Amino acid sequence: MAGEILQKFINYRVKAAIYGDYSRYTSKPLRDFIYESNNGHDFFFVSTKEEAVQKLTEARQ
């Protein structure tokens, strides 16, 4: 389901960053989803608000 939602964001050219502590999540599918998202150019999972702003700024260029 998360992949389908992410695909909608990408289709509508929406860039987003979600910040928080993801270290407590140990699910391999979730970790893989975060990894793949962070390697793209549209959707990011980062640990701080500053990182989120930086990623979105870089993605606009």
Image (cartoon, rainbow, N blue to C red):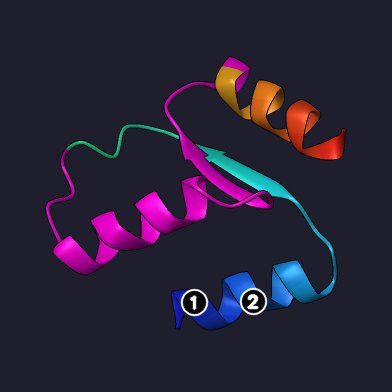
Mark 2 residue element: helix
Image height of 46 relative to 12, above or below: above
Residue type at mark 2? Answer: Gln
Where's the N terminus, which quadrant? bottom left
Residue at mark 1: 3
Residue beneath the point at 87% across and 33% down:
61
The crowding category of the residue bearing disc 1, from other C-alpha atoms within 10 Å (few below 14, some 14 to 19, many at least 20), is few
**Which region is colored magenta?**
24-50
Expressed as whole percent of the image width and height from the top left, the position of residue 37 reads 49, 55
Expressed as whole percent of the image width and height from the top left, the position of residue 36 reads 43, 57
Front-most of 39 and 22? 39
Evaluate if marks 1 and 2 touch, with contact meaning CB atoms under 8 Å apart.
yes
- In the rendered structure, the answer to whether residue 5 lies left or right of residue 13 reads left
- In the rendered structure, the answer to whether residue 37 lies left or right of residue 13 reads left
Residue type at mark 1? Answer: Gly
Find the distance from the CA under tag 1 to the CA under tag 2: 6 Å
Q: Quadrant of residue 14?
A: bottom right
Residue beneath the point at 61% across and 16% down:
50
Expressed as whole percent of the image width and height from the top left, the position of residue 48 reads 49, 21
Residue beneath the point at 29% across and 60% down:
32
Image height of 4 relative to 52, above or below: below
Residue at mark 2: 7
The crowding category of the residue bearing disc 2, from other C-alpha atoms within 10 Å (few below 14, some 14 to 19, many at least 20), is some
- In the rendered structure, the answer to whether residue 36 lies left or right of residue 12 reads left
Q: Is residue 36 magenta?
A: yes
Image height of 43 relative to 47, above or below: below
